[in-house]
Image: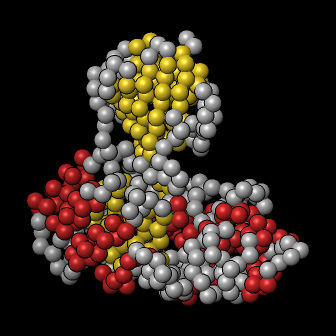
């Protein structure tokens, strides 16, 4: 994979190798950080990927996508195609209901950016069940005057994406490609679309760790790259400044102010972030930027370690420390999620008819060999290695995902599989109880917006 950013050593950039090692070890203690890239003075001084995560694999960004949507708004405003003070009702006259709450008439683009549209809930709850998301947004009446109440609202971000599409006549990816992606070395990647075919804006984008790092470094450099202005500076200054009071939040780094789809942090830093620990962090006083992907339940835990360990490590001089540098290199090379291992056990192919279940699976098949097991649901087969991972690509009632899986026998009848969806934060643990009469499959998930478990699948042997 071609590199986007220049490399250097920690001590050449005034950072202690021992401090970087301590930071890496502190992140490794968390439930699951997947990748890390640290930049100082515009150069990468530390990088690591937790296998099966890898430099070339894009990772789901979740709400870190919002910061890219914000950038699109900034370009459209700088080009005179959109205005921060444009009224929503003027941009979407064809989407307004007969009875429109009067507060919509005072709602501007800047209110959507700052998450103070006046709503008291995320309007995606109203929008997602229907085909026309814009109409559903205008049917969800604000509880407060726009500009007076912070409420994190992915529906507002979708409306920003839709506004950019209307103003420019281009989808977000096509619009951002020459303006942001190409200058920063960001390759074309998928972005989830609404029923209308518009990028959802508030989530759904995917980037590699180094592409996240390139964006974070551009933010740190006041929107510059290679001596050229990329992000409009006047807009960026507003986007990373406090635009909304979010002090009612209870986490330390979620209560120090919100900009235009960017969070302010303690220590005069700012960031874009996404669910389960996807981060693009800029630390201006330290001239340092950090990119992290994760599958975490506690997102604050990452930021605590940034401030406690990494921030104090940035100085003007650091002595060489070959032992710490080598320890970091070795730890990064060996960094890996667990791999299940046991001796294989050969069992013939068995097919089961499943009882009615919420995911809608009808059939399950299971076969075990000396080196692997094959688990098939409705014709799609997951192969898991004994003592090693096997790479797969399959859907299983969702988008196609790259999966790496290992397996072990816990008993004569219980098989355990560990599955890493290695372009996402998700890790799945399967326990399969099977014999020549019945099967039961239980799946647990490390992180989820809803429940941590699939419904239990049960079935009877038919062959």
Instruction: From the viewer's side, name the closer residue of 244 and 334.
Output: 244
Q: Position of residue 456 (x, y in %)?
A: 51, 35
Instruction: From the viewer's side, name the closer residue of 259 and 362.
Output: 362
Identified at 37% across, 14% down, the residue is 346
Identified at 60% across, 42% down, the residue is 398
Query: Could one spot residue 230 in this view of the protein?
Result: no
Identified at 30% across, 46% down, the residue is 336
Q: Position of residue 48 (x, y in %)?
A: 31, 55
Q: Position of residue 223 (x, y in %)?
A: 49, 79
Quadrant of the rendered structure where residue 87 is?
A: bottom right
Q: Is residue 87 left or right of residue 205?
A: right
Q: Is residue 30 left or right of residue 159?
A: left
Is 305 drawn above or below residue 337 in the view shown? below
Is 286 drawn above or below residue 451 in the view shown? below
Q: Position of residue 90 (x, y in %)?
A: 81, 81
Q: How many marks?
A: 0
Identified at 48% across, 30% down, the residue is 441
Instruction: From the viewer's side, name the closer residue of 148 and 306.
Output: 148
């Amino acid at each position: 994979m071609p590199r986007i950013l220049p490399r250097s050593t920690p001590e050449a950039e005034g950072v202690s190798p021992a401090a970087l090692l301590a930071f890496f070890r502190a992140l490794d203690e968390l439930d699951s950080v997947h990748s890390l890239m640290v930049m100082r003075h515009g150069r990468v001084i530390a990088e690591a990927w937790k296998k099966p995560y890898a430099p070339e694999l894009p990772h789901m960004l979740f709400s870190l996508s919002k910061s890219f949507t914000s950038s699109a708004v900034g370009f459209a405003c700088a080009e005179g195609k959109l205005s921060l003070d444009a009224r929503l009702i003027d941009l979407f006259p064809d989407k307004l209901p007969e009875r429109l709450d009067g507060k919509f008439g005072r709602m501007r683009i800047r209110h959507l950016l700052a998450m103070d549209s006046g709503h008291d809930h995320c309007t995606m709850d109203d929008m997602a069940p229907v085909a026309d998301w814009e109409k559903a947004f205008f049917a969800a009446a604000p509880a407060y005057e726009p500009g007076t109440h912070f409420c994190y609202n992915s529906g507002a971000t979708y409306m920003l994406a839709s506004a950019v599409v209307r103003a420019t006549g281009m989808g977000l990816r096509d619009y951002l490609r020459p303006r942001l992606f190409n200058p920063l070395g960001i390759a074309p990647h998928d972005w989830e679309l609404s029923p209308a075919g518009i990028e959802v804006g508030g989530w759904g984008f995917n980037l590699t760790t180094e592409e996240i790092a390139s964006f974070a470094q551009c933010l740190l450099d006041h929107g510059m790259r290679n001596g050229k202005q990329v992000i409009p500076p006047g807009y960026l200054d507003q986007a990373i400044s406090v635009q909304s009071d979010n002090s009612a939040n209870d986490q330390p780094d979620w209560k120090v102010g919100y900009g235009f789809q960017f969070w302010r942090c303690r220590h005069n830093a700012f960031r874009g972030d996404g669910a389960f620990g996807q981060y693009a962090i800029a630390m201006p006083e330290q001239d340092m930027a950090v990119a992290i992907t994760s599958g975490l339940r506690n997102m604050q835990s990452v930021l605590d370690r940034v401030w406690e360990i990494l921030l104090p490590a940035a100085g003007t001089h650091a002595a060489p420390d070959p032992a710490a540098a080598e320890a970091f290199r070795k730890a990064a090379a060996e960094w890996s999620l667990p791999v299940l291992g046991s001796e294989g056990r050969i069992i013939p192919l068995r097919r089961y008819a499943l009882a009615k279940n919420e995911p809608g699976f009808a059939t399950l098949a299971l076969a075990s060999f000396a080196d692997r097991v094959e688990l098939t649901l409705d014709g799609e087969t997951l192969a898991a290695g004994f003592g090693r991972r096997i790479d797969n690509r399959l859907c299983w009632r969702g988008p196609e995902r790259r999966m790496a899986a290992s397996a072990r026998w816990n008993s004569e009848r219980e098989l355990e599989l560990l599955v890493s969806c290695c372009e996402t934060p998700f890790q799945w643990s399967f326990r399969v109880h099977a014999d020549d009469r019945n099967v039961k499959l239980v799946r647990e998930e490390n992180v989820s917006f809803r429940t941590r478990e699939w419904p239990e699948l049960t079935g009877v042997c038919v062959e």
